[in-house]
């Protein structure tokens, strides 16, 4: 998988995280804060091999084809 950096959170310091990447497979990779809240995880009911990350609303405008 080839990742292309789309945007890092401009209000984050020092490493611009959360971060969004576009892949060469027609998908996105989202780097964010690990969701650890037990109630949220129970609601998500994640299958094996998946995880959930949280990103701020201000990152949503970056979800566009670069």
Image (cartoon, rainbow, N blue to C red):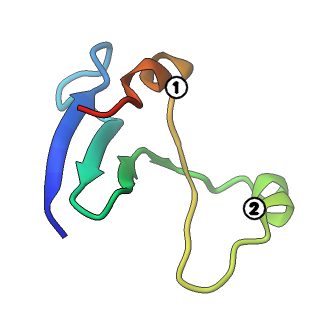
- Front position in the image: 64 or 42: 64
Q: In the rendering, at what x and y percent does residue 15 appear?
A: 18, 32
- Is 56 rendered above or below residue 33? above
Q: Which residue is drawn at 32% across and 40% down?
A: 20
How far apart marks 1 and 2 lie (CA) works out to 18 Å
Q: Cβ–Cβ below 8 Å for labels 1 and 2?
A: no
Q: In the rendering, at what x and y percent does residue 51 appear?
A: 55, 67
Query: What residue did someone put label 1 on?
Result: 56
Classify mark 2: helix, strand or loop.
helix
Query: What residue did someone put label 2 on?
Result: 41
Q: Which residue is drawn at 22% across and 34% down?
A: 6
- Is 42 rendered above or below residue 37? below
Residue at the bottom extreme, as displayed: 48
Q: In the picture, which quadrant includes the N terminus?
A: bottom left
Q: In the picture, which quadrant includes the C terminus?
A: top left
What is the number of the mark on residue 39? none
Q: How crowded is mark 2: few (under 14 residues within 10 Å), some or many (20 or more)?
A: few
Tell me if 62 is positioned left or right of 5 in this view.
right
Q: Which residue is drawn at 85% across and 55% down?
A: 39
Q: Residues within 10 Å of mark 1 (few under 14, many from 20)?
A: few
Classify mark 1: helix, strand or loop.
loop
């Amino acid at each position: 998988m080839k990742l292309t950096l789309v945007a890092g959170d401009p209000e984050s310091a020092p490493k611009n995280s959360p971060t969004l990447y576009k892949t060469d497979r027609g998908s996105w990779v989202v780097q964010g804060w690990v969701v650890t809240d037990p109630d949220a995880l129970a609601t998500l009911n994640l299958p094996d091999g998946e995880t959930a990350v949280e990103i701020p609303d201000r990152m949503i405008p970056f979800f566009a084809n670069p």
